[in-house]
C-alpha cells in the first residue's frame, strides 16, 4: 500500500492512546468502603469472560477508529490484491509489454484488448500513485528500453501499439536484466504484462536460468506479473500455406491450403464465412468447423491465364481477436527448390539428396546437388534454397557466405561430421560424439509441436518423432538458439539458431544406420528436410512470405504497399505489422507467426518453475476488467473508522438504568 | 435516656404492645399467652374434678345443672423473654449512601431498633437479653426484667462497634442452644452471608420453639449498584480491596442481588420467620410500627 501523505503515519503510535487513557482512568479510581462484597465477588465471577471480551472489543474498536483516521488522512493507495504493500515508491518502474498477436484479444463491446487494458491500468497506477519514478518501457518488438517522460504518452506510443509479431519473453527479460546491470536503477518495480502464451514464454528455454539467477540476486527489485491468461472462446484464426500458381486446362489457377483454427475446447459445429481476396477481387468461401481446426487442402481459385503473379488475402469475420483474422499471401512463378549438400560422406549425402529432392508438391521443381567440402566454394549461392552442411563448420569466406545466405532468408541445415572441429558459426559449435550410457539409443524430451520443423501436421496429427531412435549424437555448444528437440541428457538434437532472417538448423545426429533410424523411419527426416527447404525456397522467386518481426526496419523503407490495408501501415511499423508490399523486386506478404494461433497457456506449475527464485506477485486480470491496480482507498478507512466508532458507542452504552426497587418487604 | 432512643418514638409506639406470636413460658405473670393453664380472665376449658384440686375453682353452676363436679380452667398469661441478636460485623458500618459517618450506619440503625424494642419490652414487663455477634460471639446478656438490667442492655448497645467478619450463624446457633425456654429472638443484621446457612440457623431456633423475627438492614446503593467509573471497593469485613469497572459487572451484580433476595424469600417462607427487610433510609420507627402492628393480637 502506498500513502500519498505518509508523514501522517508518524501519528500511528497514537493507536495506543485508548490503552493509555484506560490505564490513567484505572489509576484515577474512587475508593469506596463496601459491605456487599459477596455480590461483588459473585458478579466478577459471572462477568469474567464477557467483561474481558467486552473490554478487548472496546479497546480494539477505539484503536481501530484512531488507526482508521490516521490511515484515511494518509491517503492510502491500494490495488485489488495485497502485493503492492510497500510504502516505498520505486525509483524506476519498468514496463515489460507483450505486444504479440494474442494480446490483441478484445472485449467485443468495448474493443479493449488485453494490451490496451494492461497499458491503461498501468498508466492509472502511475498517475494515481503520483509516482515520481522513471518510467521505462521494454516492448516485445523492439526489445529496447524506452524512457517515457510522461505517463500520458504511454498509451499513445507506437512502441506500445499492437503488432503482428510474437514475443520472445526470455529474450525480453534478458534485455531487462542487462538494463538493470548497466544502470544503477535502485529500487525498481518491474511490471510484466503478458497473456502467458506458451509459445511466447518458451518455458524450456535455457535463457531463463540466467534471468532467474540475476533477478533473484538483485536487491530492491519487485516484480509484478499482470497476467491475462484467459483464452477467448471460439476465436478463429486463419492461415494459408503452399500458395502457388499452376497451369490448368482453362488457363491457370491458384492452389493453396487453408487452415482455420478455433480456440477453446468445443466440438460444436460452427459456420465460418471466409472471404478470399485475389488481386482485389473478393469471393466467399463458406466453411463449417468442428473441433479446434479445419484444413481445406488444395483449395483452387481460377486465375487469368496471363496473370503470372499477384497478391491475396483470406479474411475471417470479426471475432475476439481481429489480428489473426487476416492472412496475406503473394504468388509468382515458383522458383526451383534447389538444395546443395556439402558432405564428404557419400552414403549420408545420398540420404540427404533423397530427402531433399523427392517432391512433396508435384507442381514444383526439386533439385539437389552434392559437393565435397573441398568444393564448397562452388556452391551456387543465388539459386539455392537450402544448403545441407555435413562437414566441419567452416570459417573464413565460406562462413561469411553461409551467414549471408541465411540473412537473405534461406535455410542451412548443419549435420555433424565424424571429426567435428571447433569452429563456431551462428554462435554454435560441435563438441564430441556421445553414445547412450545405457541401452542402444537415447531417450528424448518432448519435442516442439507448435511450430517449426517438427510441428504437427496441418490436421493436428503429430509427426512420428517418438519412433526415431538415436544411437549416437554429437554435442552442440550453442548460445541464443531455440531448441526444437532435445535428448534427455540435455544435448539438443535439433536446434534453430536465432537469426533475423532465414534459418540455421543444427541436427546433432545423422540419418545413417550407425547413428539413427532417421532413414528407415523416414517420415520425420523427410518432413523436417522438406520444411527447411520450403522455408529457404520462400526467399527465392519473386513471391516471399515473411513473418512480422523478422524484417529489419531499414529494409522496409523502400517497400511500397500492394493493397489499401497495407497502405495504412506506418513505414516504421511495416516489419511488425501484417501487410502486402513490393520491394527489392519481390512481392512480400508479411503475416503474424503462426505460433500465435496456439492457445496454450503456461500452467501455474510451469510458471512457478520458470520464475523460481524470483519474488513476484501475479495479478490475474481480464480484458476490460474493472479491477484497478491502484486507487485511493481513504474512504474505506473512513468507513472502517465510523464502524469502529459505532461499535465503540454500542459497547459503551451503559446498562439500562435499573428502576430502584422498594427495599422494604415484610413477611410475617 | 440514651441518645439512640427517641422519646418521641417511644411515645408513638406506646399504644402498640409487643405480643409474641406463640405461647411463651415466663417466670411471672404477664401479657403473653402461656402453654400452661393459669388465672387469667380468659376461659380455657372444663375438666373433671380430681381429689386435691382447689375447691374454689369448682363450677357450682355446672354441678347444679349436671350434678357433677367440674373444674373451670383459665388461660395462663406470662411474661416474654426477648433476645436481641445484633450483628456487629464490619459490614454493619456501611451507612447511608456508603457513608460511615456516626449515626448513619446500619449499626447505628440497629442500635436504635434494638434499644427501642428493649425499652418497649421492658415497659410491658418482659425480660430483655442482648447477644452481639461479631467475628465471634462477642457479648451475651441473658434476658432479665429488672430496670437495672435494661440499663445494662442499653449501655451495651451504646458501646457496641462493628468490626471483622460476621459470626452471626454461630451466634444464632448458640442462642438457640443457650436460651432454654421459649423466647422472642429478634435478629438485626444485614445478613450478608450464604442464605442456606441462615436457613439452618432459623430452623434451629424454630426447633427450640423460639419466636423468630428478623430485621434485614440494607442500603439502596447496595441494590442498585450505580457507578460510572472504576472504583476500588474496600471490603468492610476485612477482605482485600477489589478494583473493578462497575459498568462491566453491574448487570451481573444486580442479578446476584436478586437471586439472593429470592433465596431469602424462600427461606423465610419455609421457616415461617417474621421477616422485615428494612431500608436504613427510612426512619426506624416505621419498621418498628410495622413489626408491632403485625404482632397485635
Image (tube, coloured by chain):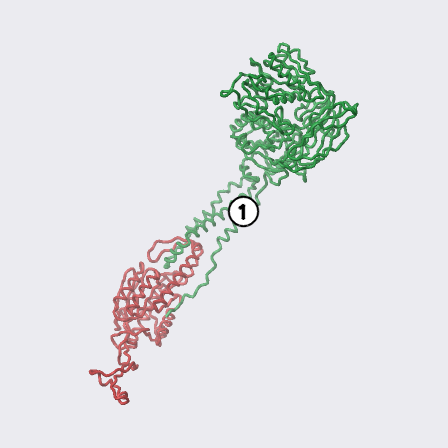
State which quadrant residue B185 falls in: bottom left
Instruction: Provide the letter of the chain coloured red.
Output: B
Camera sees residue A183? no
Q: Residue furthest left?
A: B52
Residue B33, percent across and down?
30, 76
Few, some or many residues within 10 Å of mark 1 (<14, 14–19, 20+): some
Quadrant hosting residue B284: bottom left
Of residues A653 and A240, the one nearer the viewer is A240
Residue behind mark 1: A640
Helix, strand or loop status at disc 1: helix
Which quarter of the rendering shows the C terminus of chain A?
bottom left
Residue, far front: A520
Vertical position of residue A160 compared to residue B134: above or below? above
Residue B158 picture quarter: bottom left
Q: How many marks?
A: 1
**Chain letter for the green part:** A
- x, y percent for residue B209: 29, 70
Q: Position of residue A331 (x, y in %)?
A: 73, 24
Label 1 marks a residue whose chain is: A
Nearer-the-camera pick, B23 or B284? B23
Q: Is residue A183 above or below residue B271?
A: above
Where residue A213 sits: x, y (%)?
52, 26
Amino acid at each position: 500500500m502506498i500513502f500519498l501523505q505518509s508523514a501522517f503515519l508518524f501519528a500511528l503510535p497514537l493507536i495506543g492512546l485508548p490503552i493509555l487513557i484506560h490505564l490513567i482512568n484505572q489509576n484515577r479510581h474512587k475508593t469506596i468502603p463496601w459491605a456487599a462484597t459477596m455480590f461483588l465477588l459473585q458478579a466478577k465471577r459471572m462477568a469474567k469472560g464477557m467483561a474481558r471480551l467486552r473490554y478487548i472489543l472496546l479497546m480494539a474498536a477505539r484503536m481501530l477508529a484512531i488507526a482508521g483516521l490516521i490511515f484515511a488522512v494518509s491517503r492510502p493507495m491500494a490495488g485489488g490484491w495485497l502485493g503492492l504493500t510497500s510504502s516505498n515508491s520505486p525509483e524506476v518502474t519498468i514496463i515489460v509489454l507483450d505486444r504479440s498477436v494474442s494480446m490483441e484479444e478484445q472485449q467485443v463491446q468495448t474493443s479493449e484488448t488485453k494490451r490496451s487494458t494492461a497499458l491503461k491500468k498501468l498508466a492509472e497506477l502511475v498517475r494515481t500513485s503520483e509516482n515520481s519514478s522513471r518510467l521505462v518501457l521494454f516492448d516485445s518488438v523492439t526489445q529496447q528500453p524506452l524512457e517515457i517522460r510522461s505517463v500520458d504518452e504511454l498509451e499513445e506510443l507506437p512502441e506500445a501499439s499492437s503488432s503482428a509479431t510474437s514475443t520472445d519473453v526470455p529474450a525480453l527479460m534478458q534485455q531487462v536484466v542487462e538494463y538493470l546491470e548497466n544502470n544503477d536503477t535502485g529500487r525498481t518495480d518491474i511490471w510484466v504484462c503478458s497473456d502467458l502464451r506458451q509459445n511466447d514464454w518458451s518455458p524450456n528455454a535455457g535463457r531463463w536460468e540466467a534471468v532467474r539467477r540475476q533477478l533473484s540476486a538483485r536487491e530492491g527489485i519487485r516484480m509484478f506479473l499482470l497476467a491475462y491468461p484467459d483464452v477467448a472462446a471460439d476465436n478463429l484464426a486463419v492461415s494459408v500455406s503452399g500458395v502457388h500458381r499452376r497451369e490448368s486446362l482453362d488457363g491457370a489457377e491458384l492452389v493453396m491450403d487453408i487452415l482455420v483454427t478455433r480456440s477453446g475446447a468445443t466440438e460444436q459445429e460452427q459456420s465460418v464465412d471466409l472471404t478470399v481476396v485475389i488481386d482485389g477481387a473478393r469471393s466467399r468461401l463458406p466453411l463449417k468447423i468442428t473441433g479446434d481446426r479445419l484444413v481445406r487442402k488444395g483449395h483452387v481459385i481460377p486465375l487469368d491465364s496471363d496473370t503470372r503473379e499477384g497478391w491475396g488475402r483470406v479474411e475471417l469475420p470479426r471475432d475476439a481477436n481481429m489480428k489473426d483474422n487476416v492472412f496475406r499471401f503473394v504468388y509468382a512463378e515458383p522458383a526451383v527448390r534447389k538444395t546443395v549438400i556439402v558432405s564428404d560422406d557419400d552414403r549420408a549425402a545420398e540420404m540427404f539428396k533423397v530427402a531433399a529432392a523427392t517432391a512433396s508438391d508435384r507442381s514444383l521443381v526439386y533439385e539437389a546437388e552434392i559437393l565435397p567440402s573441398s568444393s564448397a566454394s562452388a556452391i551456387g549461392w543465388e539459386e539455392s534454397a537450402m544448403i545441407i552442411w555435413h562437414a566441419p563448420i567452416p570459417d573464413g569466406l565460406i562462413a561469411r557466405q553461409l551467414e549471408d545466405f541465411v540473412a537473405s532468408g534461406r535455410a542451412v541445415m548443419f549435420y555433424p561430421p565424424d571429426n567435428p572441429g571447433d569452429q563456431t558459426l551462428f554462435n554454435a559449435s560441435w563438441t564430441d560424439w556421445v553414445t547412450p550410457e545405457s541401452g542402444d539409443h537415447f531417450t528424448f524430451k518432448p519435442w516442439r509441436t507448435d511450430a517449426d520443423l517438427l510441428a504437427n501436421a496441418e490436421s493436428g496429427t503429430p509427426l512420428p518423432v517418438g519412433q526415431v531412435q538415436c544411437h549416437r549424437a554429437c554435442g552442440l555448444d550453442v548460445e541464443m538458439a531455440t531448441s526444437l528437440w532435445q535428448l534427455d541428457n540435455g544435448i539438443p538434437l535439433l536446434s534453430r539458431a536465432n537469426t533475423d532472417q532465414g534459418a540455421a538448423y543444427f541436427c546433432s545426429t545423422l540419418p545413417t544406420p550407425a547413428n539413427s533410424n532417421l532413414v528407415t523411419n523416414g517420415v520425420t527426416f523427410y518432413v523436417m528436410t522438406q520444411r527447411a527447404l520450403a522455408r529457404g525456397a520462400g526467399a527465392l522467386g519473386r513471391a516471399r512470405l515473411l513473418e512480422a518481426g523478422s524484417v529489419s526496419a531499414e529494409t522496409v523503407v523502400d517497400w511500397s504497399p500492394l493493397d489499401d490495408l497495407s497502405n495504412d501501415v506506418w513505414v516504421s511499423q511495416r516489419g511488425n505489422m501484417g501487410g502486402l508490399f513490393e520491394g527489392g523486386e519481390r512481392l512480400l506478404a508479411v503475416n503474424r507467426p503462426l505460433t500465435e494461433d496456439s492457445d496454450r497457456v503456461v500452467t501455474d506449475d510451469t510458471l512457478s518453475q520458470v520464475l523460481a527464485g524470483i519474488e513476484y506477485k501475479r495479478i490475474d486480470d481480464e480484458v476490460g476488467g474493472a479491477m484497478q491496480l491502484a486507487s485511493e482507498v481513504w474512504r474505506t478507512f473512513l468507513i472502517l473508522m465510523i464502524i469502529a466508532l459505532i461499535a465503540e458507542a454500542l459497547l459503551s452504552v451503559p446498562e439500562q438504568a435499573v428502576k430502584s426497587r422498594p427495599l422494604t418487604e415484610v413477611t410475617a | 435516656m440514651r441518645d439512640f432512643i427517641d422519646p418521641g418514638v417511644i411515645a408513638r409506639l406506646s399504644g402498640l404492645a409487643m405480643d409474641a406470636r406463640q405461647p411463651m413460658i415466663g417466670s411471672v405473670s404477664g401479657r403473653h399467652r402461656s402453654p400452661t393453664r393459669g388465672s387469667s380472665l380468659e376461659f380455657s376449658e372444663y375438666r373433671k374434678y380430681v381429689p386435691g384440686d382447689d375447691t374454689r375453682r369448682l363450677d357450682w353452676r355446672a354441678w347444679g345443672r349436671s350434678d357433677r363436679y367440674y373444674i373451670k380452667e383459665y388461660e395462663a398469661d406470662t411474661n416474654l423473654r426477648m433476645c436481641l441478636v445484633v450483628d456487629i460485623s464490619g459490614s454493619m458500618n456501611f451507612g447511608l449512601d456508603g457513608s460511615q459517618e456516626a449515626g448513619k450506619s446500619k449499626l447505628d440503625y440497629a442500635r436504635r431498633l434494638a434499644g427501642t424494642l428493649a425499652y418497649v419490652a421492658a415497659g410491658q414487663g418482659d425480660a430483655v437479653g442482648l447477644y452481639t455477634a461479631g467475628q465471634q460471639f462477642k457479648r451475651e446478656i441473658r434476658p432479665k426484667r429488672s430496670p437495672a438490667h435494661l440499663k445494662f442492655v442499653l449501655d451495651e448497645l451504646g458501646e457496641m462497634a462493628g468490626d471483622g467478619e460476621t459470626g452471626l450463624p454461630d451466634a444464632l446457633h448458640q442462642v438457640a442452644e443457650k436460651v432454654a425456654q421459649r423466647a422472642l429472638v429478634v435478629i438485626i443484621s444485614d445478613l450478608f452471608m450464604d442464605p442456606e446457612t441462615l436457613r439452618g440457623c432459623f430452623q434451629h431456633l424454630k426447633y427450640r420453639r423460639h419466636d423468630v423475627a428478623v430485621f434485614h438492614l440494607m442500603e439502596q446503593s447496595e441494590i442498585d449498584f450505580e457507578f460510572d467509573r472504576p472504583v476500588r471497593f474496600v471490603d468492610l469485613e476485612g477482605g482485600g480491596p477489589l478494583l473493578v469497572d462497575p459498568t462491566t459487572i453491574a448487570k451481573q451484580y444486580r442479578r446476584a442481588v436478586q437471586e439472593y433476595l429470592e433465596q431469602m424469600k424462600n427461606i423465610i417462607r419455609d421457616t415461617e420467620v417474621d421477616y422485615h427487610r428494612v431500608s436504613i433510609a427510612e426512619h426506624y420507627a416505621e419498621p418498628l410500627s410495622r413489626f408491632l402492628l403485625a404482632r397485635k393480637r
